[in-house]
Image: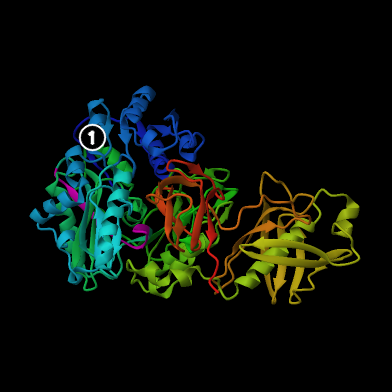
Amino acid sequence: MTTTTTTTTALPITSVLVANRGEIAVRVFRTARAMGLASVAVHSDPDADALHVREADTAVRLPGAAPADTYLRGDLVIAAALAAGADAVHPGYGFLSENAAFARDVLAAGLAWIGPPPDAIEAMASKTRAKELMRAAKVPLLDPVDPAAATAADLPLLLKAAAGGGGRGMRVVRDLDALGPALDAAAAEARSAFGDGEVFAEPYVERGRHVEVQVLADGHGTVWALGTRDCSLQRRHQKVVEEAPAPGLSDGLRRTLHEAAVAAARAVGYRGAGTVEFLLDADGRPCFLEMNTRLQVEHPVTEAVHGVDLVALQIRIAEGAALPPEPPEPAGHAVEARLYAEDPAQDWRPQAGTLAAFDVPAADAPAPVPGTAGSPAAVRVDAGYAAGDRVGVHYDPMLAKVVAHAPTRSEAVRALARALAGARIHGVTTNRDLLVRTLRHPEFTAGAPDTGFYDRHLAALTAPAPDAGRAAALAAAAAALAAAAPAPGAPLAARLGGWRGVRSGPQVRRYRIGGTEHEVRYLPVRGGPPHLPDLPDVRVLAAAPDRVVLEAGGVRRVFHVAHRPDRGAERTDGAGEVWVDTAPAPGSDAPASHALTAVPRFTEPQDATPPGSLLAPMPGTVVRVAEGLAPGDTVTAGQPLLWLEAMKMEHRVTSPASGTLTALHALPGHQVEVGTLLAVVQEEEPRP
């Protein structure tokens, strides 16, 4: 469906600067290009060759690396817009997108602001003040709780930062004794993230649903409610899977949510795209959470279902256009998954590294056409990275959003799971396997997600599949056969003989997958592919350096093999990084993609670390050390020693054992890499 607007005020925009980075900057640039507008990127030093910079027509450097020195410097961003000749600024989401002072400065500089009025941003900036406004507008609310007067009857409580979002400054309190420390920790995190340590408390709704309404308002009095989205699947209060429309809502409840969202927008004189978020309790009663005065990460599911381009509409509204009286009707169902560089099995630990390969088998279009009966599913990828890019430690670990749209929810869910399962992502650990398992989990496919989903199911969703060992063994076999196979341009004798090495006995290669070592023995056969004596039900049908075909248990399977690009093929001693991808086995939860480390034939000496060494589990910045902590102190197992910040999240590092802290090398502000020695704890001798 094509949505037209009527322009009543001539404020033509010709060039747009996006005050952001990553996938949202790339996504805005694509719409700008489609509208015939020039695009301007800003970038920090680590982002000098990032995808959003490559996608823009012009780019301006913001010297430094930390967000506070770059993407959060509104003065530098405005100076960049003026220097590059941009006449409009789009804030994206995060960073300065909900900063009223920045919006005012943009307008004062004579630039168009592709966002809501600064007064509306300011009105909703504080969650506590926003709730007061919503109460006056008769929007349903949770009653606040005074932490100083809280009793056991008020538990559990949710502590929330009054400013900002993204799950920062949030804590769930289930014990009154933990309330004081939790308040201090939430305030410290909020102050660090947003410069505002205000924290408030409200009842924590167990197994609630996070449902939101997309609103779009022009400057002529029209406010659209563009359907609902369910964003209940979250980790650390940050969304992971979103869908539109929210499943299982009655028509009456949908009307209530739409009316409340429109009332919220009108209460602050809203203009542009925004989202009003609600929490539904177990009985389906809605309560206002907050209003995000910006475009949401999950906006593509609304675009897919309603057939609109929200960024294009933002730009037209900023030019003074009027919306039609009614929004376009919805069609079909859309589901989005956020692909993160993180390890869910290790407390969602963020990952860094170079993406040796990054390919999700999907079409990449700004706004898929709504599905109709009998139409195929459409899959869209909004990515902030491409193969060869480095994922750093300074910013959010989201790599891409993958969105599937189909006539029905079940078709959309299946299409999204298949696209993710077939992705080739090499070089960085991601949450891809977790997403696939989530989308295929009976509770999710039944259409009844809630905010406690990962609390209940994370252990099972990250546990090895029953056939994971078999899948890893086949991947290791494929890697070994590919390493031994002659290259296509090899001499005729090598190709006829078929295999490198001594042909009189089995050859051996070893690979490490995760923490498990796999030994592969193959017996070369003159004139044909080798035999795998340890896998009697597996036949080798073909093998080349990049492709191996095996018949396993009577089923033919193709394995694609890749080596780390900067290593070429394996080193002569057999060491190196290898990735093996295959089609997912039907009905199996085992990974279809494996990262392998080839174990060298001759082990190189490694630098030894003292017993009890505490090594950095990720690259990041030391933001805090436990108060008063010093060498010589007695510590207990699990005691927090220091905190690392990486990719917008804070991670606690605890003592591995009870004993004496004999060394402390970490200081606040220090940048550390994976494996950096942070401290040493000498474990206490067990008592006889």
Rendering quarter of residue 258? bottom left
Q: Is residue 667 above or below residue 687?
A: above
Q: Is residue 346 visible?
A: yes
Q: Nearer the viewer, residue 258 or 578?
A: 578
Q: Is residue 431 visible?
A: no
Magenta region, mostly helix, strand or loop? strand
Tell me what residue is drawn at x 30 percent, y 41 percent.
97
Residue most toward the front? 688
Task: Inspect the image, locate mark 1, and give the three-letter code of the amino acid beneath it.
Answer: Ala
Residue most toward the left? 136
Residue 235 on the magenta segment: yes
User: Callout 1 environment at 10 Å: few (<14), some (14 to 19), or many (20+)?
Assistant: some
- Residue 227 is situated, as x and y percent measured from the top left of the image, at 26, 58
Magenta extent:
221-239
Tell me what residue is drawn at x 37 percent, y 59 percent.
236
Q: Which residue is mark 1?
A: 101
Question: Element at badge 1?
Answer: helix
Q: Is residue 106 above or below residue 465?
A: above
Q: Nearer the viewer, residue 678 or 20?
A: 678
